[in-house]
């Protein structure tokens, strides 16, 4: 979404979820031990989600897209969509070949629906095994890195200033005790990592009160 006012930002919503422990490269021995014990499926932690024009992804629009791609697969739309549950339900899984064909139809139709609505799938995987420190630093560094990459991509598309409103999963820390990363702590760390990532990527860091980010891009409150 472009703007005619050079001083105004093009506005987007960024919806993120994560997969992985965000502890597989931790510098904390207790976190590494917890990861080794609890995560037998070894794969790099990653973020994935959607970048959409501000306000475009409503509950009604999400229902419309999900209903359409499930119909394309010949599956009923469940109350909660989570594909790892489909293997356990006879209404979805009869045999592997049939399931794979239906799943391919669902994904193909979903991608068509996203493209038609100008919704951009995004993903960042720590396939190189970069060590960010502890889990909280790992997670917020990954979010900051994805943010900067998206801003640079939009700049290449001719958008000089970007505003991103971030909606993402809560971060559960398990070492030394289970707790959620607080909103203020999350915002502080994200602001810090976005500023550092901006400098690495060639943007000038910008002090912010109601925004977190760099110039030309700016990130709204998570």
Image: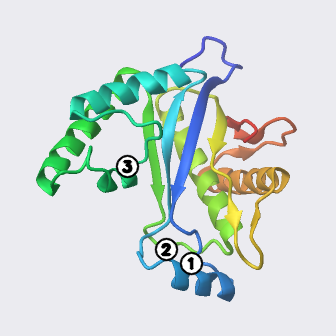
Reading the image, the residue beneath label 3 is 83
Q: Local crowd at mark 3 within 10 Å, few (<14), some, or many (≥20)?
A: few
Locate residue 159, reporting x and y percent: 55, 26
Badge 1 crowding class, 10 Å Cα cut-off, few under 14, some 14 to 19, many 20 or more, is: many
Q: Name the residue beneath numbered marker 2.
A: 129
Classify mark 3: helix, strand or loop.
Answer: helix
Residue tagged 1? 25
Q: Looking at the image, which residue is at 49% across and 77% down? A: 39
Which label sits in the foreground, 3 or 2?
3
Alpha carbon separation for disc pair 3 and 2: 27 Å
Compare residues 177 and 91 and report the one nearer the observer.
91
Task: Indicate the quadrant where residue 162 lies.
Answer: top right
- Residue 27, visible in the rendered structure: no
Residue at the image point whose x is 64% and y is 34% from the top: 164
Per the image, label 2 sits on a secondary structure element best described as loop
Q: Are marks 2 and 1 in contact (CB under 8 Å)?
A: yes
Residue 97: x and y, percent?
12, 53
In the image, residue 221 lies at what x, y percent? 76, 38
């Amino acid at each position: 979404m472009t703007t005619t006012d050079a001083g105004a930002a093009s506005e987007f919503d960024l919806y993120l979820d994560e997969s992985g422990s965000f502890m597989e490269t931790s510098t904390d021995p207790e976190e590494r031990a917890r990861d080794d014990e609890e995560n037998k499926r070894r794969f790099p932690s990653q973020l994935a989600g959607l970048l959409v024009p501000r306000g475009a992804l409503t509950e009604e629009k999400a229902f419309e897209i999900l209903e359409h791609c499930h119909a394309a697969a010949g599956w009923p739309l469940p109350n909660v969509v989570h594909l790892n549950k489909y293997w356990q339900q006879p209404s979805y899984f009869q045999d592997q070949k049939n399931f794979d064909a239906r799943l391919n139809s669902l994904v193909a139709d979903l991608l068509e629906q996203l493209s038609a609505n100008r919704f951009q799938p995004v993903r960042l995987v720590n396939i190189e095994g970069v060590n960010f420190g502890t889990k909280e630093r790992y997670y917020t560094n990954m979010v900051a890195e994805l943010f900067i990459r998206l801003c640079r991509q939009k700049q290449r598309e001719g958008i000089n200033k970007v505003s991103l409103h971030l909606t993402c999963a809560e971060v559960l820390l398990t070492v030394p005790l289970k707790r959620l990363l607080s909103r203020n702590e999350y915002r502080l760390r994200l602001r810090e990592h976005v500023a550092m990532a901006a400098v690495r990527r060639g943007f000038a860091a910008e002090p912010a009160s109601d925004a977190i980010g760099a110039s030309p891009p700016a990130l709204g409150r998570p």
